[in-house]
Amino acid sequence: MISVEKKPSVSRRWPNRVAGWTVARLSKAVNFKPIPNKWPTKWTVVRRSISGGKQHQDGQGSGQQQQQQQNQQGQSGKGKFVKIRKRWSWKAGAGWTILSVLDWWLLAAGGWLTWRGVFLRWTPLGICMIAAAQWHLHNRDLDKQGLPRTAAPWQMNVYCSLPLRLMSRCWGWLADCRVPTPARPLVYGMYSSAFGVNLEEAASSDFKNYRSLAEFFTRSLKENVRYIDSNSCLVSPCDGRVLHFGTATNAQVEQVKGVSYSLEAFLGPPTWSARKPTESPPSNLVDAVKLKSPGNVLYQCIIYLAPGDYHRFHSPAVWKPELRRHFSGELLSVSPKIARWMPGLFTLNERALYIGKWKHGFFSFTAVGATNVGSVQIYIDEKLKTNQWVGLEVGTHPCKDYDELALPKDTFLGKGELLGQFNMGSTIVLIFEAPPGFNFNLQPGQVVRMGQRLGCVGEQRDDDDLDKTKKLLEAI
């Protein structure tokens, strides 16, 4: 008789292999030790704090030997899987499994449960969640009241606490650096494509003729590219988009629809309108600003210059600037989205305000600074220095202090005369006095070009006689 040794079937061999593989993997997970010069120190600290220190590691040695013996017995003998399964109770097996999974999770998380992880990882997440909840509740309250979604005071403080002035100064320095000649077509071409620059209108259409980004921003235009409307008493001082226009009937003036700013905070005290002792004091700030007639109306027009627009600005009318006020404030963005979100934006930002008069009375021209505006340059005012270091104060602080300078008495500006330039996109604000019949030829959000008609008194045409206009201004 030939004895044939019966090999165990696959169904009988498979449980033994499963048992051996399971116990081996569990033993490796339980007896995990950090490898010197490979795992970071913080993982070693976390591992010891969870596993119970040195005593637990000593106990792991005996447990490891027992499990190895069980593993060898399970692979060699028959029916050993039943004994191993009995020893593998829920209490011991679940405990070691959870501990090993937790160890591996801590290794993958990189120490989120350490003190450093709590303060540097969990805490910022919690602050962000609280801020998001506050933002949602604030917007919900505004929606219930039927008001536009504007910034809360704490949101304005957070936004103003950003180092925008330092960033703008760095950007101004970078924009003034010389760009290598071979790289100029690539750099200026990418900027032109991103912001829609029309280089055909520039005096020089060759990218290589611009030494730096600042020179490219403040490029001049070709002659006869812009037409100055001689029949309009008020023309656009720049290329840009009209944010808002209309009347200023009280101390709060709209910067966009539904969002306003303070007229007194924007202009400062009306010390230019010296009145006689016999005259009665004005009843409100709007009347105090006027110079010519109490029956006149105060108007305003706000034009936003995008980064791709022509960055120089011109005189919008024939007028006489007499006073300059420089408010050194914030350098927040003046884009239409921020203007709709932040009330009083123009009273917070740095601005150069020029106050004077034109043939209808009071007239003011304001160049408002913004983020990444290296400087605002006014050709008739060489003493003006903008974007200067003002200290480490953070948060919103309204511009109550300002520098004031009296301009020469013989200073007159003609319509369309070159006045200054921005080193990046910004905003022009016109506030002026005119008769009640003044009409704007504009639409909200309309794109205008320098010299384009903004408005006039009825169908009245402007008088181009400069000498006659000067005599009229001297009489006001």
Image (tube, rainbow, N blue to C red):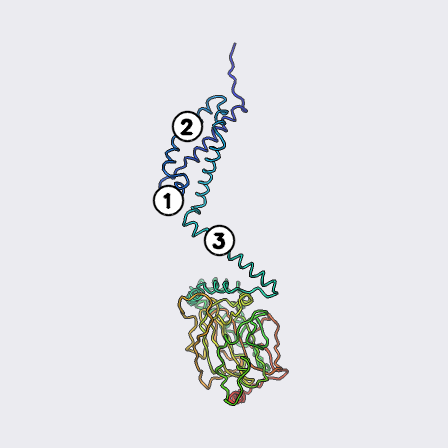
Which of discs 1 and 3 lies nearer the camera? The answer is 3
In the rendered image, which residue does mark 1 sit on?
41
Q: Residues within 10 Å of mark 2 (few under 14, many from 20)?
A: few
In the rendered image, which residue does mark 3 sit on?
126
Question: How many discs mark residues in the rendered view?
Answer: 3
Asked which secondary structure carries label 1, the reply is helix
- Mark sitting on residue 473: none
Task: Looking at this view, name the residue that lies furthest to the right.
Answer: 459
| Near-viewer residue (169 or 276) | 276
Q: Residue 29: percent from the left, percent from the top?
A: 44, 36
Q: Residue 179: percent from the left, percent from the top?
A: 43, 65
Q: Are marks 1 and 3 in contact (CB under 8 Å)?
A: no
Q: Earlier in the sequence, mark 1 or mark 3?
A: 1
Q: Amino acid at mark 2?
A: Gln
Q: Report the residue at 43% width, 80% height from top.
A: 405
Q: Earlier in the sequence, mark 2 or mark 1?
A: 1
Q: Residue 430: percent from the left, percent from the top?
A: 54, 77
Q: Residue 5: percent from the left, percent from the top?
A: 51, 16
Q: Residues within 10 Å of mark 3 (few under 14, many from 20)?
A: few
| Near-viewer residue (273 or 134) | 134
- Marks 1 and 3, Cα distance to the nearest angstrom? 27 Å
Asked which secondary structure carries label 3, the reply is helix
- Mark sitting on residue 66: 2
Q: Amino acid at mark 3?
A: Gly
Q: Report if residue 15 is visible in the image.
A: yes
